[in-house]
Amino acid sequence: MSHLSDLVLDRLVASETDRPVDPAVARHLTACSRCHERLESFRRIRQEGEETIDRLVSSAQAATVHRSSFMTNESAQFWFRQLVLAATIGCVATVAFVMLRQPTFTTPVAGKVDDWPAEIRSKGESIHFFRQRAGAVTPGMSGDVFLPGDALRFVVSATAEPTYLLLTGIESSGEVSAYFPFGGSSSEQLAAGAETTLPGSIVLDASPDTEYLLAIFSPTPIHLAEVTQAVAAVRSESRLSPLELPALERLGVPGHHHWIVVRKH
Amino acid sequence: MDRIDLVDAARQYGSAILRRSYSILRDRADAEDIAQEVMIILLQKGHQFRGAPSQLGGWIYRLTTHTCLNRLRTRRRRLTREYSSEVADWLTVQPANPLESLTSRYDLTALLDSLDELGQQVFVYLHLDGMTQEEIAETTGVSRRTIGKSVKRIEEILAAHAEVSP
């Protein structure tokens, strides 16, 4: 008999109080120390994770019961339909509003732009960004709503010598990516006094989540792992709910932080 | 199977769901998200399960694998953010090499890309769970013969990957 699969071991751990162990499996476990040890580790994982499992089951129950009681009440169903209708109208109105206000942003930009958002220029460092959509390049604002396919490009400057920059993207799920240096593991030094256009651009995907771009300017290099760990800690504190800026602004990572909120339609 | 049994099942298999999600995704937060999602589906749709109680574990395995693979696909979409050639001439600055840093880091992703949905599941069951082809057939509800073909295809792809890797 080959080694026992995870499925067999999980079944054993899950149902060992309900059913007797298959004799062939029991014989194998007696003879095979590898499978015996793995079974013990599965049991240990189960014991150590009891609290987490209780929390997850309770949350799942709450979500299910809420949905069940809501949907079985005819009156509630009527109001649910009204709510959906109202939400649809709201969405259409929002889209119309966004489309109507777009012309103020669609003036194509050639060369440099002077009217950068003030909130991302401070302490001798600045970060600006452009958005390209359908061939038109416009200055971007933190908090703007972006569409899948929009491409973002960044311009930074720093006066102090030396200044290092790490530009990261943080998904509301807590996933962290390095955008400058792209795919890198730590900050890269900037040329002091000069305005630098970062190479390449970020093309936004179709995921609807808000993304938080964090530019960290620092006198010494910052490692991406420091950001990843700090984000994981914040996410853990927020009990795995989607991350939001107020929580992220408490990241315990050194350096000057500049945030850009990218909302996706 | 009524609601009480399903809650019990969620508790009994909770550890397996979480451990398994972590094995596939390698991220604690993602694994907990997936475990939560699987449990909600289990509580909402578990009554549709028509198999014997002893087969419930396989059903939960399949559900967990499917949900994890979906999450991997979403991750993959996010990882495909790339340097766009359309914006190469922005501000007259040349972009960096578009493929820089995107290659060779996601061998698993590339591998999964080469497989259809069944192949992806078979790959996980075979190489992550150490299942036999019979167990995979039982878990997926697909014939042993089809699983055999899928395993053969996976072996070919793995051999091809081994040839191109240094």
Image (cartoon, coloured by chain):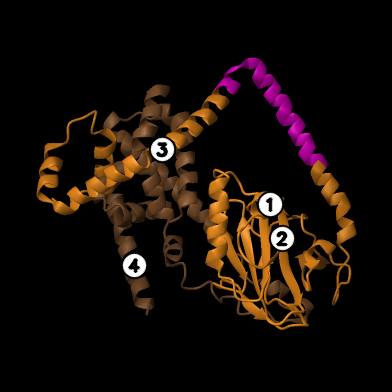
Chain colours: A orange, B brown
- Amino acid under label 3? Glu
* Lower sequence index among marks 3 and 2: 3
* Marks 4, 2: nearer the viewer: 2
Which chain contains the residue that carries disc 1? A
Q: Are marks 4 and 3 on the same chain?
A: no
Where does label 1 land, which residue? A245
In the picture shown, does residue A61 fall above or below A122? Answer: above
Where residue A72 appears, as percent x and y from the top left, is 57, 18
Please tell me whether mark 1 sits on a helix, a strand or a loop.
helix
Classify residue A169 by image quadrant. bottom right
Q: Is residue B24 above or below residue A73?
A: below
- Label 4: element kind: helix
The image's mark for residue A259 is 2
Q: Which residues are magenta?
A: A69-93
Residue A231, how many percent across, how many down? 57, 56
Is disc 4 in the same subunit as disc 2? Answer: no
Q: Which residue is mark 3?
A: A51
Task: Give the class, few, some or many, for how many residues have Cα within 10 Å of label 2's Cα (few <14, many ≥20).
Answer: many
Find residue A26 and report its image quarter. Answer: top left
Q: Chain of mark 3?
A: A
From the viewer's perspective, is the residue at label 4 or at label 1 nearer?
Answer: 1
Instruction: Identify the main secondary structure in magenta.
Output: helix
Crowd around label 1: few <14 · some 14–19 · many ≥20 (10 Å): some
Give me the residue at 54% from left, 23% from top.
A68
Q: Quadrant of residue A120?
A: bottom right
> In the rendered view of the protein, which quadrant contains the N terminus of chain B?
top left
User: Residue at (37%, 71%) from the top-left corner?
Assistant: B161
Q: Position of residue A145 (x, y in %)?
A: 76, 53
Instruction: Check disc 4 and report the residue beneath it.
Output: B158
- Asked whether residue A77 appears in the rendered view, the answer is yes
Please state the horizontal and vertical placement of residue B18, each as a whole percent of the image: 40, 45
